[in-house]
Image: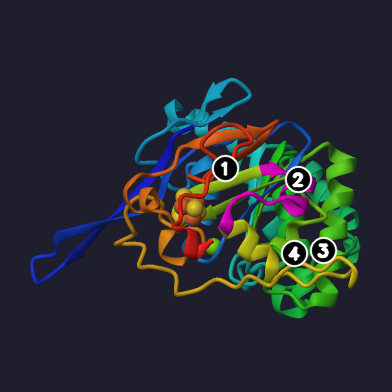
Amino acid sequence: KGLKKYFPITGGVFGKQVGTVKAVDDVTFTVYRGETLGIVGESGCGKSTTGRMLLRLIEPTDGSIVFEGKHVTALSKAELRRLRRDMQMIFQDPFASLNPRHTVEKILEEPLIVHRMGSKEERKRRVREMLEVVGLGSYHAKRYPHQFSGGQRQRIGIARALMTHPKLIIADEPVSALDVSIQAQVLNLLEDLQRQFGLTYIFIAHDLGVVRHISDRVGVMYLGRMVELADSESLYESPKHPYTQALLSAVPIPDPDHKRERQLLSGDLPNPANPPQGCAFHTRCAFCMDICREQRPEWREVTDGHYVACHLYESAGGWRDDRPIEQK
Ligand code: SF4
Ligand code: MG
């Protein structure tokens, strides 16, 4: 709730603070048990920073995080360590996150050692069990990361995240580095594991296409802010925010009868250190009105469970268009 992460920008010979990047600026959302919440946005929108803050791998500047009634933001180091059994992360680049000098067995055993879980025998047994669960086969235990393909390495990353029996997995672009043919296999595996272990996912991606089938709900971020959040069906069928509409028009549509007007994004992503006033999207928005340049739009629930931050939706369900007639 109200999550913020501000990074100082330093410059000059004395390293004085010359500005602030609001990497995450007042983001609020809920994740329900057993669901997959997709979080989507261009690089630099703050989606990874948000994911890392939930685990306190990055300390929030402000805001609160509550997990099963516990205030994550108020936990001591020891309590936080206990909590990290329950909340694990999967990273984009499985190779960079796996120690090249360690065998798969050692890599997978490590979280259990860190959390002091199980005897040596039990740990070895669990490593073999998890290798089978992610479809690799336990005979791989003595091999090293470089002996695996990209897709297999991501399976190792997934197995490592599951070692401590977590409840929540934050997956930060887990398939972005993989070939398209392999992406589907890894997504299917994640879905199977969710059913098998009752997992909850926060699935971060830069493209709405990737999260479409795996997500129950999707949040869209732009320049550090959440601009729209809805269940997948309403988001893909009736996107409300002009940014979501633009992102969706870039996703290929499988059904040729279902034509969507191609509405491309105009202009470049503004410098995050100096975001536009008012609605941060106004420099690229086809519907920009005077109020958009001055006032930040509020986060509103416009229909049941469908949230949007945009001046076009001033009242529930309403559509406001203040542009001069000739621009409409
Ligand atoms: Fe566009 Fe204004 Fe809505 Fe921002 S608030 S998305 S500028 S219409
Ligand atoms: Mg990222």
Contact (Cβ within 8 Å) of mark 4 with mark 1:
no
Residue 308: give its label.
Answer: 1
Upstream in sequence: badge 4 or badge 1: 4
Q: Which residue is mark 3?
A: 186
Task: Give whichever of 59, 127 is nearer the camera.
Answer: 59
Give, as a single range, the part of the protein colored magenta.
230-242
Q: Residues within 10 Å of mark 1 (few under 14, many from 20)?
A: many
Task: Give whichever of 155, 106 is nearer the camera.
Answer: 155
Q: Is the image coloured rainbow, by chain, by secondary structure, or in one colour?
A: rainbow
Label 3 C-beta lies within 8 Å of the nearest ligand 2 atom: no
Q: Which residue is mark 4?
A: 209
Dot 3: element: helix
Upstream in sequence: badge 4 or badge 2: 4
Residue 234: give its label.
Answer: 2
Distance between mark 3 and mark 1 Cα atoms: 31 Å
Horizontal side of 230 relative to 243 (left or right) equals right
Residue 44 at x, y percent in the picture: 46, 63
